[in-house]
Image (tube, rainbow, N blue to C red):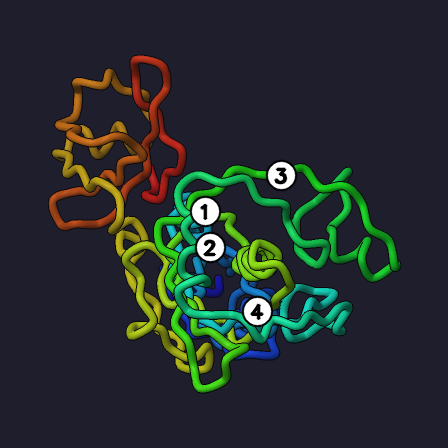
Amino acid sequence: MAKETKQPIGIAVVDKPAGLTSHDVVAKARKVLGTRKVGHSGTLDPDATGVLILGVGRATRLLQFLTLLPKSYKGEIVFGEDTSTLDSSGEITATYDMTNLRPSGVREATKSFLGEIEQIPPMVSAVRVKGKRLYEIAREGNEVDRPSRNVRVDRFEVNPTENPMVYEVFVDCSSGTYIRSLAADLGSALGGGAHLRNLRRTGVGSFKEDEALPVEKIVLQSPIVGMRDFEVVEVNEETRKEVSYGRVFARDRLEIKKEGPWALVDRSGELLAVYKEHGDKIKPAVVIVDS
């Protein structure tokens, strides 16, 4: 009988290049790693670059938690032009005379976008409306009403460049925030229009761009690395066996200090499972270890 090949498992931090979709990066990773079981933790626009976290093998189950981590971005806002996609990949749909723009006024306008805000997703986005992706509807030449969503912006910093119509921008925000929409809405707030260009995701939670590698040089890290932004709880051998069976525990069974989800590890540091709240108990959301 042929020996069963051990399937790869782990987390990889990739630096997505411009011109590829996030799915393209996943497809390349599948070829490099020799497995189809690869997923990513949050879509980046094709023209955008930067941090994209991949899950491989059973670690794809951890992506549901990584998707929720806050994000950091940098890019450029071009004032005076609206585009069909809200970024430089689209066609110019309107132009404005914004020669009276001043750094102090731009910075003052950003303040209204800080904190909890409502945002309408762009038509060219992967959000589903009635079961269909918005970008699919946009390709057909149609536009539909999109429900607004609550997002959080913790940093919205703009700095002038040598071009008075172009500002460097830095954003720290919650998952689900569209930087393209922030740029366009800022342009509207200043009495004109704007679009985004050269967007780069510089961080996902504690995962920063300086540790991201090209997909061709992908390095798999242990699944526990993917849970480093969450509380890690070490369990003894008896509890380890119960975890492998997916046992539900009373909340006081484990030494939990923070809100969930919680990454349960054994004494060697191996990730066993991720638990979440279940009423007054905690139950497994993901079990990694075999029983």
Q: What is the residue that sits farthest to the top in this orientation?
A: 280
Rate crowding at label 3 as few (under 14), some (14 to 19) or many (20 or more) other CA atoms within 10 Å. Answer: few
The earlier-in-sequence mark between 4 and 2 is 2
Q: What is the residue that sits farthest to the front in this orientation?
A: 100
Three-letter code, disc 3: Ser
The earlier-in-sequence mark between 3 and 2 is 2
Determine the residue positioned at 88% across, 59% down: 141
Determine the residue positioned at 66% across, 48% down: 127
Q: Which residue is mark 1?
A: 112
Residue 26, image x, y percentages: 55, 67
Measure how far apart labels 3 and 2 are at the Cα level.
21 Å
17, 118: nearer the viewer: 118
Q: Secondary structure at mark 3?
A: loop
Q: Which mark is residue 109?
A: 2
Q: Which mark is residue 196?
A: 4
Residue 288, image x, y percentages: 35, 44
Q: Which mark is residue 148?
A: 3
